[in-house]
Image: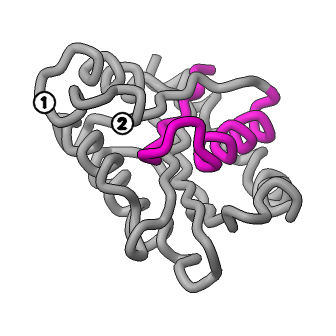
Amino acid sequence: MKTIAVVGNPKPQSRTAHAATMLVEAITGQMPQVIDLVDLGPGIMIWGDPAVQRAVQETSEADLLIVASPTFKATYSGLLKVFLDQFAGRESLRGCVTVPLMLGAGPAHAMAPELHLKPLLVELGATCPTPGLYLSDRTYEDDQAIAKFVDRWGPALQRLTSMEQRIDP
């Protein structure tokens, strides 16, 4: 199973990247391939940049995709939006079982992954079978939110990714 975490935090080695890695490890027991968008540098603003196009291609080939962002102004980061804008359209993420993940400072924006990020991912063709996951950027390592999410949704995500592999090789 090809698992990728796309991280749209403009800060290198962010808590967002760490949380996305923790989520993938909890679901699959393996380290994910992480595409940290900040590492793409200014090329992310240039349509057709080879490194960005490779990242788009790798992302579209994921069986399990975690798309992670900090919460900025009650929604996902502009960095993530610029990256997702480079996908070709409604079928770009077809076959990708996807979990929207966002970190924030408090519960006021807990619905942001569900209301803002998930619709964008679905528009690109992603299959988002679970609720979006919102984590506190201060407590995500210790508050058991990831463990609770995986206990509830991990088996379904694993079944769906194995089904996608059989249906869409």
Which residue is the extreme one toward the left? 47
The span shown in magenta is 1-29
Q: Nearer the viewer, mark 2 or mark 1?
A: 1
Compare marks 2 and 1 and give the one earlier in the sequence.
Answer: 1
Magenta-span inclusion, residue 15: yes
Residue 167 shows in the view: yes
| Image side of residue 135 versus residue 168, left or right | right
| Local secondary structure at mark 1 | loop
* Residue to which mark 1 is pinned: 46
The amino acid sitting under disc 2 is: Arg
Q: Can you tell which mark lies on residue 94?
A: 2
| Local secondary structure at mark 2 | loop
State the separation of the CA atoms marked 2 and 1: 24 Å
Residue 61 in the image: x percent, y percent? 42, 22
Residue 32 in the image: x percent, y percent? 64, 26
Q: Looking at the picture, tell me which residue is in the foreground, 166 or 120.
A: 120
